Amino acid sequence: MYATASESFRDITVIDVDTHLTEPLDLWTSRAPAAWKDRMPQVHEVDGVPTWFIDGKPFGLAQPSSCILEDGTKLLGAGFRNLRHDQIDPGSSHVKPRLKVMDNTGIAAQIVYPNLLGFGNTKMTGLDPELQLMTTTIYNDAMGELQAESGNRLFPMMLVPWWDMESALAEIKRCHKMGLRGINTNADPQDAGLPDLGTAHWDPMWELCQDLKLPVNFHIGGSQTQNTWFGSTPWPSQGDDQKLAIGSAMMFISNARIISNLLLSGVCERFPTLQLVSVESGIGWIPALLEALDYQSLEMAPSARAQLKLKPSEYFKRQMHACFWFECDDITHAIKRIGVDNVWVLEGGLKAWREHGLPVSQSPEVPEAVAERLGVKLSAPGTLPN
């Protein structure tokens, strides 16, 4: 038994591939031009309750998106919804204390996703497009600063102004020049009256991301459809904690929609080096889905399948990636069926694990648990067991 998680990993480089930022309350107001400041996301008390406002209108409770308290303990259940920012670990929002936690837990780097504006930048849908764009660009500016301040240990995924293609392409180019390494976008733009992602409307974005070698991330809950589905999945009679548990589990399957549609849409055929990532969706269900898509596409859509050179499972292996954090049962078998280079997302997935490191969740107790489920020793990287 090692004294600390950091010591237990020793010479193994650990990359946390799905972490989130609880946005500082002044992220937008401290950066906005004077003419925009009053319209930016900001917090005011409403009947004693901290509340986000955008453009002078309520935008939801200003609750931190964290369940790790200031003393380092973890709050279980739905109670985190009642927390205030001063009750959580400051590393949830700020770089230096986060790096300290990472050092203590043996984590070399993290890929960072947003909270307030939605995992796919969808929560501002319907607002003034200029305001949406300004809010998005300020967020991305802050993420560029965060990455630089961390010494390139924190890698935020940029938000895309998906509602306007010209703006989207310009922002992707701008953020790429800032050094941001991937994009995060709406999985269901048809919710807002735009064409879905399988249409030629999105080809300029796919082409740009392919050319710039920017992975496209689809985080669970990254669209209005996914969030509605999350809320409607549990039966009304369930309590808040049960609804959270059921919805969280079933959100995995909501990303099966995205994967399935992308694989059969021809996007991977048209853009053969574009890389796509399913985030926070687990992996155990993926082999069954791919087998079903291979079979059903031949049985039910033979003419459409004839337009594709590869099977859905082969496109997945060539261009898609996924990540997991708590799954244990037969996980090495699932990894092998999916492809060791398709599990995780940074530096070639588990190829990086074989050569450099071992993926891990954020808990300081995980080193032995992760090693046990993958069947490896912590003292040195190796190959996956038979």
Image: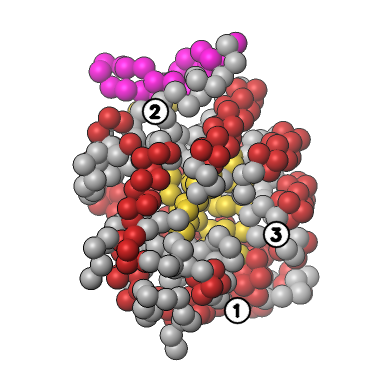
From the viewer's side, name the closer residue of 386 and 295. 386
Determine the CA span between mark 1 and mark 2.
44 Å
**Percent of width and height locating residue 299:** 64, 78
Dot 1 falls on a residue whose secondary structure is helix
Which element is circle 3 on? loop
Query: What's the amino acid at mark 2?
Result: Gly
Taking depth in this image into account, of 301 and 39 the one nearest to the observer is 39
Q: Is residue 213 magenta?
A: no
Q: Give, as a single range, the part of the protein colored magenta.
A: 35-58
Residue with the mark numbered 3: 274
Q: Is residue 40 magenta?
A: yes
x, y percent for residue 171: 69, 36
Q: How many marks?
A: 3
Task: Let me know if residue 31 appears in the view.
Answer: yes
The residue carrying mark 2 is: 60
- Amino acid carrying label 3: it is Leu
- In this picture, residue 242 sits left or right of residue 373: left
